[in-house]
Image: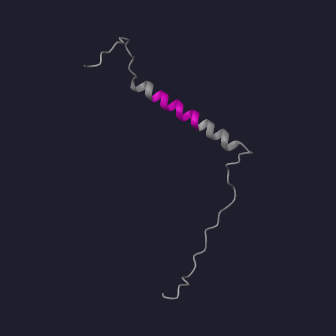
Amino acid sequence: MAYKRTSTSAVPAMTYAVIKKLVADSVATALEAQAANMANADNTNRNTELKEAPVARKCSYKEF
């Protein structure tokens, strides 16, 4: 037996302009949060030390 839909409320369709505005607002909010996080002097996630790459060694295997 097929499922019968009981809700008759009309859902308003989202237009392209509304979606574009939502995306722009989300991006602006994320950029503001990132700028505030980067400006934080006590940020423990910030790694200011330079990392050194390990030095490549010559092969010490006797059979080579």
Residue depicted at 58% across the width and 79% down the height: 57
**Where does residue 40 sit, x and y in percent of width and height?**
71, 42
User: Looking at the image, which residue is at 53% across and 35% down?
Assistant: 27
The answer to whether residue 41 is magenta is no
Which corner quadrant holds the N terminus? top left
| Identity of the residue drawn at 67% across and 54% down | 47
- Percent position (x, y) of residue 48? 69, 55
Magenta stretch holds residue 22: yes
Is most of the magenta stretch helix, strand or loop? Answer: helix
Task: Work out whether residue 37 or residue 64 is closer to the camera in this orientation and state it.
Answer: 64
The span picked out in magenta is 20-30
> Residue furthest toward the left?
1
**Height in image: 32 above or below 1?**
below
| In-image side of 31 versus 12 (left or right) | right
The x, y position of residue 8, in whole percent, is 35, 11
Q: Please indicate whether residue 44 sits to the left or right of residue 31 in the image.
A: right
Quadrant of res 18: top left
x%, y% of residue 51? 65, 63
How many numbered markers are drawn? Answer: 0
Q: Look at the image and name its color scheme.
A: one colour
Is 1 situated left or right of 21 in this image?
A: left
Task: Pick whichever, 53 or 22, lies toward us.
Answer: 53
Image point 56% across, 84% down: which residue? Answer: 60
Q: Is residue 61 above or below residue 38?
A: below
Residue reaching furthest to the front: 1
Q: Quadrant of residue 33?
A: top right
Which image quadrant is residue 52 in?
bottom right
Q: Taking 35 as reference, is 56 above or below it?
A: below
